[in-house]
Amino acid sequence: MKEMTPSARRSISRRGFLRTAALASGGLALASCDKNSREAFLQRHFRDMTPEELAGVLARLEKEQSARFGKAVHVTAEPPMEDVLFGYGLDLSRCIGCRRCVYACVEENNCSRDPQLQLIRVLEMPKEEGINIQQANAYYDPEEVPREDSFYMPVACQQCRNPQCTTVCPVGATWHEKDGIVVVDYNWCIGCRCCMAACPYGARHFNWAEPTVSPTEYNPETHFLGNRVRPVGVVEKCTFCVKRVRNGRYPACVEICPVGARKFGNLLDPQSEIRYVLENKRVLVFKEELNTQPKFYYFYGT
Amino acid sequence: MNFLRFIAGSVQCVIRGGKAYYAWIGLLLALILVGAFGVVNQFSSGLIATNMRDQVSWAFYIGNFTFLVGVAAAAVLLVIPAYVYNWKPIKEITIFGELLAISAIVMCLGFVICDIGRPDRFWHLVPLLGHLNLPGSLLGWDVVVLNFYLLLNLFIVTYLLYCAYTNREHKGSFVNPLIILSIPAAIGIHTVTAFVYNGLAARPFWNSAILAPKFIASALCSGPAILLILLQILRRTTRLEIKDEAIWKIAELMAYAMAFNLFLFGAEVFKEFYSDTHHLVHARYMFFGLEGHRAIVPFTWISVIFSLTALVIFLVPATRKNWVTLNIGCVLIYIGVYIEKGLALVIPGMTPDTLGEIYEYFPSTTELQVAVGIFSLGFLVFTLMLKVAVPITLGEFRLPPKTG
Amino acid sequence: MLKTDASPGKGGRFILAAVCLAGLAAILITFPGPLGASEPTTPAETAGEVPAAGAAGPTHSGPGTLYQVPPPPLSDYFPCSQCHADMEVNRTRRVLTEEHEDIVLHHDEENRWCLDCHDAGNRDMLRMASGALVDFTESYRLCGQCHGPKYRDWKAGVHGKRTGHWRGDKQYLLCVHCHDPHAPRFKPLKPLPPPVRPENLR
């Protein structure tokens, strides 16, 4: 046993104490978390969960959110339907820029009201320039729309077939479902915002603060991958109202549009409206040169 | 057993020092405390405490991260002359480059943790435990290579210092391949970081093949600048003998890197302005401002002027070998590249945003506090490691001989 | 809708006309089209309240009706024959001054007037170019005579407001649920508020 100077002995015991203290406090922190926080912390990726695990998670979320919003909240996880690939059409000859879609979407999807988060952005552009985003203005606020010399182009997630957002995510928290919807597992996302940098359409939005939705406004019919209230620090985006569409209904924006500028349907069904649009109308894709292959088609209905 | 002694002795080295040392450590701890306030504020209210918003979703933190990855990679500028060309004057001081690399990576990790929205979900990045999205995600690769580089350097440094501490010859056949490995590793970390940016088709300002070479060039010309200043400080404050030639050679190599960096910069500027597509709007914002938004413009021009001046200082042997001008040049190039790679890369890439909106970003108080804290943490780590490494290198800190 | 058997007397006719006009005015103000009051209703806001096909209220699916639609607006005012059955038919093109003067025609008014679409003999029906009569519940056939491409799109579900299910029951609306047939062009709307600017997000 080699001789140790008194100070060396002290420093070893000091180190030992510090190490024990660190371990103890870490363990204590984890143990003192309530069961829910511990479960939430350890929750696995949506795609790795067994059906039992998922059911447990959904039950936990329902309980938490029913308590939080004072009403019976449902959180489900309907899988994609067979032989369905969703497509969307937006009639640029009709949109008047009234923004009713923006607010219907916020209501349906329980987006944060404060700080404000909107999944659809309507761009006003001068008619003579065509689609030139350098001339775009999302903050137009005239007395009446449409303005004489402008046209309006709402932009939200284009549900690309070849998205970069899903490739760049370091933890695989966002992926392309079989029915074509690009979804986010809000409990897996680490909030690095790489997907936001990768999205050419500004379609992804970040919860910079804890989202606030009042209990009266909260839409209780929610989907795990869609419109359930999000935690702070994660990315969200349009999911084609996954809860609605996987139950056969139209997205909220399609239903609210007062001028019928929005079309939606199953691209794999030759009788669908969206196929009719693609076959009969002049269709274009936003930022087509980036080869994202969106399933959101802008067209001219007249 | 000896290793425990080594740790114990290192702690001794670290807690003992002169007045200047204590003052320096005290300052760093105070600044780290400032950073801690910022971090706590951020954790409690969310990233809304920063000035990042959807339109500019990566900003100050990622800019600093990018710059510091470059600083970490710059150690290679010492390793190549020392181990590939076996040039003795630099071989003696390579270890300081590696210590700088370690501190820089620590700072990089600090910035990443403070930038992501959910640091509590960090474990999602760990392969097997979480889900690391390889081979697709470049950020995933960045996690791998940065940690690999950190561990590699930590291992090399610990091994070399421990061998010296125990009065043993380090095994060249064992450690030299690792040190040589750190060369492609260093190039690797910075190339992967560049790929994180230049793979994004959505951001035309970054979506350029030239970004990876430019990153390497700017890293090599700025990272060693701190080292040059530090080596002069070490020469004055310790008994370390660092040859003038070593410092001048590093400065010379930096000069070539600077020239290459400016060449690549010029190539980019040419392409943007000559092709004159819509994508020019980002470069225009950076150099001239857009629609009245000009906050970044003075910084861009300062960076350009500083970098050019530094190039001249470093190229001309007279000014390179003059200690005053050399140090001025070091400060100039450090600031120049910090702006170029930190601010003037990330911000113009996101301004205007993908839908043509201009949100003029500048860091918030919280972001500045956190950045100061992280930089101080890095300096603290560097100082503490030096406090052990220098005595070992000098032979002052050694395993006590066996008694009895 | 109730069809009264008794024919009203002179005073009663006057009262009935006044009530009809008041009802028409009320309906026009709340019409699913941006008309009338200071805060114009949008087709969306009212069409959403329009009962779905087959829902409360009798539907007007006459023979040959392909598209189940909610009751046409003006249904409470209907049947027009209540007044017109006893009135003389005046086929002279003119601007109406005694009744219906609040209806200003902005729909190819240079070339057409009321009796080109409303059947002179039977005001409870509409009149196609061939002279064939068509029920108000099938007014899309009338519109489709001139607006062929729109009609084809509407039939495919691609023109007009879309509610209901993308798979299964589509909810069709009549043209007139959104477009006032006498002045079909949509009035501009007041837009909902713009988004909060990022620098103002706290």
Image (cartoon, helix red, strand yellow):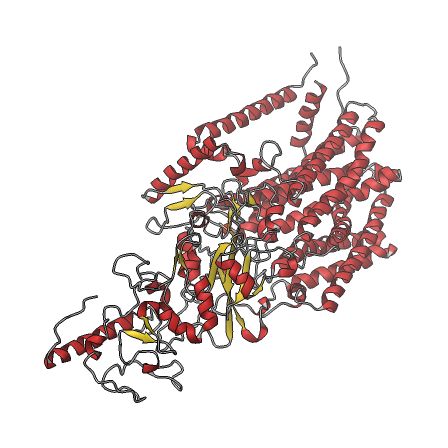
Total marks shown come to: 0
Q: Quadrant of residue C154?
A: bottom left
Residue closest to the eye, A277 or B297: A277
Q: Is residue B272 left or right of residue C23?
A: right
Residue C116, percent from left and from top: 35, 81
Residue A119, percent from left and from top: 48, 56
Residue B228, compared with residue A295, is above or below; it is: above
Q: Is residue B17 left or right of residue A22?
A: right
Residue closest to the eye, C183 or A234: C183
Q: Is residue A144 visible?
A: no
Residue C96, compared with residue B33, is above or below; it is: below
Q: Is residue B156 visible?
A: yes
Residue B388, compared with residue A109, is above or below; it is: above
The residue depicted at 38 percent of the width and 73 percent of the height is C142
Residue A210, percent from left and from top: 44, 47
The residue depicted at 26 percent of the width and 77 percent of the height is C122
The residue depicted at 15 percent of the width and 70 percent of the height is C4
Residue B132, percent from left and from top: 62, 38
Q: Quadrant of residue B374?
A: top right
Q: Is the N terminus of chain A in the top left, top right, bottom left or bottom right quadrant?
A: top right
Residue C163, compared with residue A37, is above or below; it is: below
Residue closest to the eye, B76 or A113: A113
